[in-house]
Image: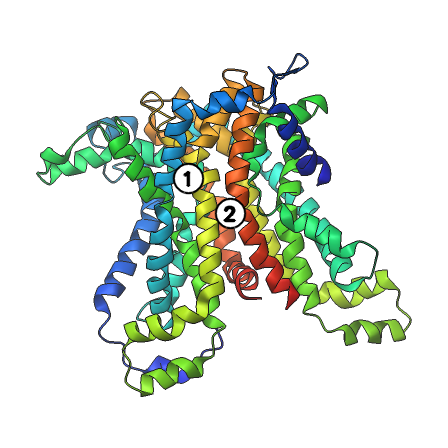
Amino acid sequence: MAGTPPLRRQRRRRGSWPLVAAIALFCVSAILPLLFMAATAFRTQADWADAKIGLPTTASLGAFERAWTGANIGLYFRNSLIVTSATVALSVVSATLAGYAFSKLRWRLSGAVYLFVLVWIAIPPLLLMVPIYVQMVQLGLLDTYGSVILLYSALNLPFNVYLMTAFFRSVPDELIEAARMDGAGIHRTFQLVLLPLAKPAIATLVIFNVLWSWNEFLFALLMLQSDSVKTLTVGVLQLQGRFTSDYPALMAGLLITSLPVIAAYLVFQRHLVRGIVAGAVK
Amino acid sequence: MGAFVAYPFASVLYHAFTRWDGIAPSEWVGVSNFRLLWDDPIFRTALKNNAIFALSVPIQLVLPLIVAFAIHRRVAGWRLFRATVFLPAVYATVVIGILTATVLQLDGPLNEALGGVGLDGLQREWLGSASTSIPLILLIVVWTNFGYNVLLYLAGMSALDPSLEEAARIDGAGWMRILVSIVTPNLRRVLEIVLVVNTITAFAFMFTYVYTITNGGPGTDTYVSEFYIYQQAFTNQNMGYAAAIGVTLVLIVLAIGLFQIRILTRKEAR
C-alpha cells in the first residue's frame, strides 16, 4: 500500500461520491457499537427505562462500579489478562523457533512435519469440541488457566508457524552464511542475526494472537466454569443473565471487554495489515 | 500441538461410531449414529441455516472488492476508511452478539427508533422468528468480516504492477472498467482465499453468533451445526452422536479445506 507512486494523490477524485458516501456510512456503523456502549454505560437505569437511545444526563460511574465489583468483571479482566499474555508468549516463542527450524535448518522429515502443521489451518477446531473437552477432563486441566492457555497456543500455532516460516524464508541465506563464517553456531545465528530482523513479523503475530485469545468464546465457555478462572467473554455473558434489566451495567461490561483490544488494534494496526499482506500475497 | 489437535481428531472419528455419555466407557454401535443423523430434522434445519449463512460468500466476494479498490485509488478519506473498516472484526463476537440481542429486543432501541420516526408499522419482534432473525444474523456476520476481506483485497492490489492500471487509464478506461478488466483477473489468488475463508466461516464459525443472539430459538429454528453439536454433547450428554455430527461436518469442511491447503502449498512451491 505504501508503494504507490505519489503522483496519484494529485489526481482529481471525481465521479465516485456515492461510493465514498457508502463507505463512510459503513465506517460510521463500525464506530456505532462503541458509541452506544459508552453512552448507555454512563446512563442510569432510570434513564434506560425512560428511553433506550439517549445521551447520559449525569456522568454516572455507577454502572462501571456495579459491573467491575458487583458482577466480578474486575476478576474476569485479570483472568483474561493472564490467559492472553501466557498464550501469546507461548505460541509466539514456539512459532518463531519452529519457523526458524522449518526455513533455515536442514533436518529429516522437515517437509513432512511442515505439511502436517499446515493441514490444521484448514480444520475448524469448533468441530473437535467434544474430544478436546473429554481430553481436558482426563488430563485434570478442566477449569484451570492451563486448559485454555495450552489449547489456544495449539490452535494458533499452525497459522503462526506458517507466517514465521514464510518470513524467515525471505531472509537471504547469505546473511546466515556470513554469520557462520564468523564462527556463530545455529543458536547464536538465530539470536544475533535473525531475531532482530524478525521484530516486525513477531509484532504481527502478537497482534493477531492478542485479538484471537482475548475474544475467544466457545472453549472458554466449555473449559472455564468457576468465577476464579473465567475470562471476560464468558463472564460478560453472565452479566446479561444476572442483570437482565441493568443494561447500563451490561454495557459497561461490554465496553471494558472491548477497550483493550481496540487499543491494541490502534497501536499495532500497521503490523496487522502487514500480516494480512504476508498471508495473502507472499 | 499434536496432543491437542491430532489426538482429538482421531478420538472424534472413533467415537462417532459409539454410544457414549462422556463418562462411562463407550459402546460400539456401528453406523447407527450416521443413519439417525441422515433422518434428523434438526440436523437438516441446522445445515440449511449454515447454507443460508453461506449467502455471505458472494456478498463478500464483490462488495469488499469494490471498497478495497476505492481505498486503493485513494478516494477522499481513504486513510480513515482503511483504519475503520476493520473495526467490526476487532470487537469480540460475544460483544457483538449481546449488543445485537439488546438492540433487537421487543422494547429495544431499534423498535423505539422506528416508533420515533413514525415507522410503527415496521416494529416487530425481530428475534421472534427465524424469518427475521436469520437474515439479521447474516447481516451481522457480513458486517463483522467485511473489513478483513477488504484488507485481503487491498493486500492483493498493493502487490499488482501499478503500470498496468496506469496504461489502462491513459487508454481512457473508467475506474469500473479498470477494476473489472485489469485488477480483478490479477487477484485470482486473493479471490480464492476470500471464497474459502468465508465458506468455512458460514459452516464452522457461527456458534457464538447463534448462542448469543437467538440461542437457537425459537425452538430449533435458528440452530446451526456446531450449535447442535454443542447441544447434543453438553446438554443431552450424547457425546457419540455429537461426534458423528462433527465427523460429517469435518468431511464437508475438509472438501473446502483441501482446496485451501492446495492454495497455500502452491504458494510454498514457488
How many numbered badges does the structure rendering display?
A: 2
Quarter holding residue B240: top right
The chain letter under disc 1 is: A
Q: Position of residue B223 (x, y in %)?
A: 39, 28
Callout 1: few (<14), some (14-19), or many (20+) C-alpha neighbours within 10 Å? many
Q: Position of residue B85 (x, y in %)?
A: 38, 56
Quarter holding residue B212: top left
**Residue B225 drawn above or below residue B202:** above
Task: Name the colouring of the figure.
Answer: rainbow
Query: How far is mark 2 from mark 1, CA to CA?
Result: 36 Å
Regarding residue A216, the answer to whether it shows in the image is no
- Is A77 left, or right, of A141 in this rendering? left
Regarding residue A4, the answer to whether it shows in the image is yes
- Amino acid type indicated by mark 2: Ile
Q: Nearer the viewer, residue B121 or B188?
A: B188
- Is B251 left, or right, of B63 in this rendering? right
**Residue B175 drawn above or below residue A109:** below
Q: Position of residue B253 (x, y in %)?
A: 51, 42
**Residue B124 drawn above or below residue B118:** above
Secondary structure under tag 1 reads helix
Callout 2: few (<14), some (14-19), or many (20+) C-alpha neighbours within 10 Å? some
- Is A202 left, or right, of A186 in this rendering? left
Q: Looking at the rendered structure, which numbered label has been put on residue B192?
A: none
Secondary structure under tag 2 reads helix
Q: Which residue is mark 1?
A: A255
Q: Looking at the rendered structure, which numbered label has been put on residue B256?
A: 2
The chain letter under disc 2 is: B
Q: Return the residue found at the far right.
A: A183
